[in-house]
Image (cartoon, helix red, strand yellow):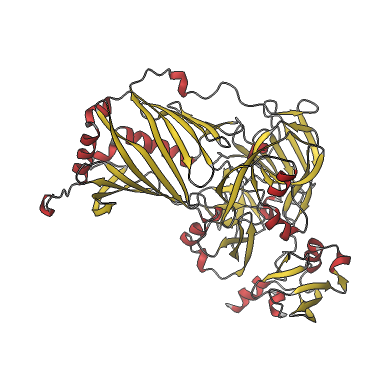
Amino acid sequence: MAAQDQIEDPQEVLRRHYQASGGLERLRAIKTTYTEGSMELIGTGLEGTFTRWSSGLTKYRTEVDLGAIRQIDGDNGSFRWLVDHNNKLQMRRDSVTLRERFLDSLAAVHEELDPNSPWLEVSLTGMEDVGTAACYVLKTTNTVNKTVTYDYIDKSTFYLLKRVAITPDDTTTTLFSDYRPVGDFVRPFRQESTTNPPGMTQVIVFDRVEFDVPTAATLFEPPDSDVRDFVFDNGVSAEDVPFEYIENHIYLPVVVEGDTGLWILDSGAGSTVLDRGYAEGLGIELEGTIKGQGAGNTVDVTFGRMPAYSLPGVQFASQRVAVIDLKGVIGKLLGFDVAGILGYDFLSRVVTKVDYANRKLSFYDPDDFVYRGEGVILDAPVSQENIFLVPLTVDGVTDGVWSLDLGATNTSFNHPTARKLGYLDREGIDGMAFGAGGGFATRYIKVDSLSFAGFPVNETTMSFPVHTNAGALAGGEQTGNIGNTLLRHFVLYLDYAEQRLIVEKGDDYGKVLPPKYLTGLQLILDDSGRVIVHNVMENTSGDEAGMLAGDEIVAVDGKSVELLGGLIATREAFQGELGEKRSVDLVRDGKKKRVKFELFDPFARLHSSTQ
């Protein structure tokens, strides 16, 4: 085709694409579609089968079986639902899903062909090659969400060869090939999709594609009943279970095959997680390896089936779990081993009451739970990552939704939100934060006000990742994470069945605790078990005293690390009230050294220096 014959109208390119696919009127006349085939996640060891039925504007049902990962999801025309790898049913009503449903309904009626559409705008950005084929590149934006799509349509065959979908959280590039006739239509029988982050490639090969297959309407409905894989010792609840609150995290004992270990309670974990070494000690067979999102970066995740487990007052049946190396990060940060993380696969079964001030947890059967208190009830739809989404007001502005993360210490903006709202330019204290994905640079800032569930909170220190990264705090769909330094003021009820969060003032509401950043020293254990300064935050007491990353802490105020009781006790020895003095014995470059300093508020110094 000569240059002068190239099409300039994007709608004309689309019309020819649909004509090449079988004709627009025929496409619009399709009542149902059935496909089946094979699916492989490249380089993960996970492969298997899928089947999918679709009907009308939004109705569908998809069944995927990759061995370690099995899932059924669907849409009955009114709402979306999902049955996950542990047979837990979830109704999907988060804002991301609702917007996706609406866009799917527009695609079903080919709304993109309307140049005056109030929702979609299609433009022709030029020509690019996909392999050896010259393609028209169509850009589609919409007023529903922030996704931008680029379609590469072969100018010779008018087949779609590539699609790039850019969302606030990731970019997915899909290649379409192996076009074959199916009756009056032509369909690609191979799709290869790569999503970054985390850098995972999925290949789908269709074995069957059929149209207008008789399909029962009930196929698109969710199951009538939900999984019941737990039982309370007294039949209805387990109340006032004590927990340990260490380093702003909730720990409780969990028994697996007679072994009692400490586990973290974490509403920010999309599944229950086992430490790899602990899983291997239990003899659990591990399957597959994929990239998952930690707080700061991606993390290698495998899968296995954990035996039945129990907490005080409640028993759980065997479940499929994710397995990661917790000891490699958490062990160095805490100085003790953590067996696992109780995440969505645990929390979604029960109503969980968290009383931070009194260090008590209570678990209730959702079928019998009735709330009769005077707390504030927040709508808390569960995200596609299985995390509660709730509002938070910062500096008088309620912007977007926040992940409720009982596994996070601080309340943190996601990086894109901090950039959008101008917090990246705010002066603060730079340090490091740590999560399952490792460490990442973070900045602590002061905001003028925080309000949660209508309750003003005096905990006004927040943080954000300094750089764009591949972790959970890099996403743009949520505003940020609400962590325990804020949540400790309250009593919380996490009710997944009703997708709601109930918030009451706790006994510590409004109580001001000395901030833990006064010294600016971030300590870890090295491989030899020594307490090492991993990082010194600028403009803090430790920085002013001349302490450096790599210093080995030997004693604090004359008490040895051994006498103090290890890493956490050493951290606590550095804490205190403003004006208190500390004497530190350390080893630097093989030489002993004593450093003295006084605790001061770095934010007060920072504020005064800018006046």
Question: Is residue 10 visible from the viewing direction of this image?
Answer: yes
**Where, by quadrant of the figure, is residue 118 drawn?**
top left
Which percent across, then down, holds residue 609? 60, 79
Residue 556 in the image: above or below residue 191: below
Q: Nearer the viewer, residue 382 or 586?
A: 586
Residue lying at 56% horizontally and 71% vertically, measured from the top left: 427
Residue lying at 60% horizontally and 32% vertically, measured from the top left: 498
Q: In which quarter of the image is the C terminus?
A: bottom right
Q: Nearer the viewer, residue 355 or 585?
A: 585
Question: Is residue 264 visible from the viewing direction of this image?
Answer: no
Residue 37 appears left or right of 499: left
Which percent across, then down, holds residue 485? 68, 55
Residue 137 appears left or right of 438: left
Residue 453 in the image: above or below residue 367: below
Which percent across, then down, holds residue 137? 26, 50
Q: Which of 300 and 139 is in front in this view?
A: 300
Residue 53 in the image: above or below residue 299: above
Residue lying at 68% horizontally and 50% vertically, measured from the top left: 487
How many numbered dots are placed on residues in this image? 0
Q: Nearer the viewer, residue 284 or 323?
A: 284
Residue 535 appears left or right of 78: right
Which percent across, then down, holds residue 20? 22, 36
**Where, by quadrant of the figure, is residue 601 drawn?**
bottom right
